Image (spheres, grey):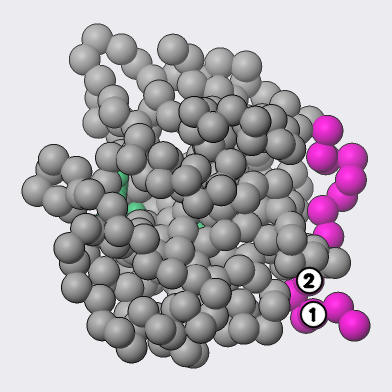
Amino acid sequence: MSRPDSLTFPPHLIPPLSPYLPRPDSRREDPSSLPFLTLTYAASLDSMLSLAPGVRTALSGPLTKSMTHHLRTRHSAILIGVNTALADDPALNSRLVGAPLSSQPRPVILDPEARWDFTSQSKVIQLAERGEGKAPFVVAGEGVEVSDERRSLLERAGGKFLALRRGKDGGKRFDWGDVLRLLKSEGLDSVMVEGGGEVINSLLGKEGNRYVDSVIVTIAPTWLGKGGVVVSPERSEGAQLRLRDVVWQGYGEDVVLCGRIER
Ligand SMILES: NC(=O)c1ccc[n+]([C@@H]2O[C@H](COP(=O)([O-])OP(=O)(O)OC[C@H]3O[C@@H](n4cnc5c(N)ncnc54)[C@H](O)[C@@H]3O)[C@@H](O)[C@H]2O)c1
Ligand SMILES: Nc1nc(=O)c(N)c(NC[C@H](O)[C@H](O)[C@H](O)COP(=O)(O)O)[nH]1
């Protein structure tokens, strides 16, 4: 029997997305390559991800929601920042009908200060225990203390804490190159970055955007208004950040924009 929230993605929508997605096994042979990185999120007409920090806000319609769940099966990892984990109690699996565990992405939470307060009741842990998704890898700052209890809760579900040196900005963020090398060393060859705002803006910034292989954005026909979490990266001197190889497609009332960063 299918689960109550199981989704289907119409097969005719797959070919137009494929040029923007990692090819299976394409990077596996080359140990020096970094994982393929797809940046994907849903935004309002005023480039907002949510009504306010810490508030989960549904933007995608049924078709773009099913697209996101298709994208999840096409990547080996799905990455979010800790504020999104705190705000959303996310599932981070694919709810496509019949998606086997082998096609589920590995959730990765960037959590430099180990702030994510997951419990055995957290959705992502419960799904992992039921075999409906993989347990998360939590990337915490090197030397940050994590209790044995939390560590073993995560490990029992099949996940783990990974320690990573923190970046130069007072230790609040990781460097994207370090994150991607760490994921590669864990056998993860492709990653979709879903958010939230800080993660997306830093990835689109000067240091981060060189690692982005493709961008897939859902735009929903609504304005969330001032005060929301906005996608608007720091400006790099002298250069506007732009997409090339751009394709727009109507998905019901939403639009999906695919492209690659112009270098
Ligand atoms: N519409 C969407 O597609 C979408 C997607 C994801 C999240 N959201 C929403 O976004 C909001 C959360 O966004 P946010 O901006 O508050 O936080 P966020 O989820 O981007 O988390 C930010 C935190 O991640 C950590 N981090 C580690 N390395 C980092 C790096 N290199 N760059 C940036 N952060 C790094 C830091 O601790 C930082 O404070 C929530 O309301 C959530 O519902 C919406
Ligand atoms: N595509 C998309 N459309 C939306 O309308 C919306 N709100 C998100 N939000 C993404 C989301 O905030 C995080 O990536 C999660 O936290 C994943 O959570 P789920 O696995 O869906 O529970 N994403």
Task: For mark 2, give the secondary structure.
Answer: loop
The image quadrant of residue 109 is: bottom left
Q: Nearer the viewer, residue 194 or 162?
A: 162
8 is within the stretch colored magenta: yes
Determine which residue is flagged by label 2.
Answer: 6
Q: Nearer the viewer, residue 168 or 209?
A: 168
The image quadrant of residue 204 is: top left
The reply to whether the C-beta atoms of the residues labelled 2 and 1 are less than 8 Å apart is: yes
The disc labelled 2 sits on which kind of residue? Ser
Is the CB of mark 1 within 8 Å of ligand 2?
no
The image quadrant of residue 61 is: bottom right
47 is within the stretch colored magenta: no
Location of the N terminus (image quadrant)? bottom right
Determine which residue is flagged by label 1.
Answer: 3
43 w.r.t. 93: above or below? above
Q: Is residue 7 visible?
A: no
Q: CA distance from mark 2 to mark 1?
A: 5 Å
Task: For mark 1, give the secondary structure.
Answer: loop
85 w.r.t. 237: above or below? below
**Magenta-tinted stretch:** 1-15
Where is residue 77 shown, x and y percent of the image?
Answer: 56, 52
113 w.r.t. 149: above or below? above
Where is residue 107 shown, x and y percent of the image?
Answer: 52, 61
Question: Is the residue marked by circle 1 packed among few (<14), some (14-19), or many (20+) residues within 10 Å?
Answer: few
Overall secondary structure of the magenta section? loop
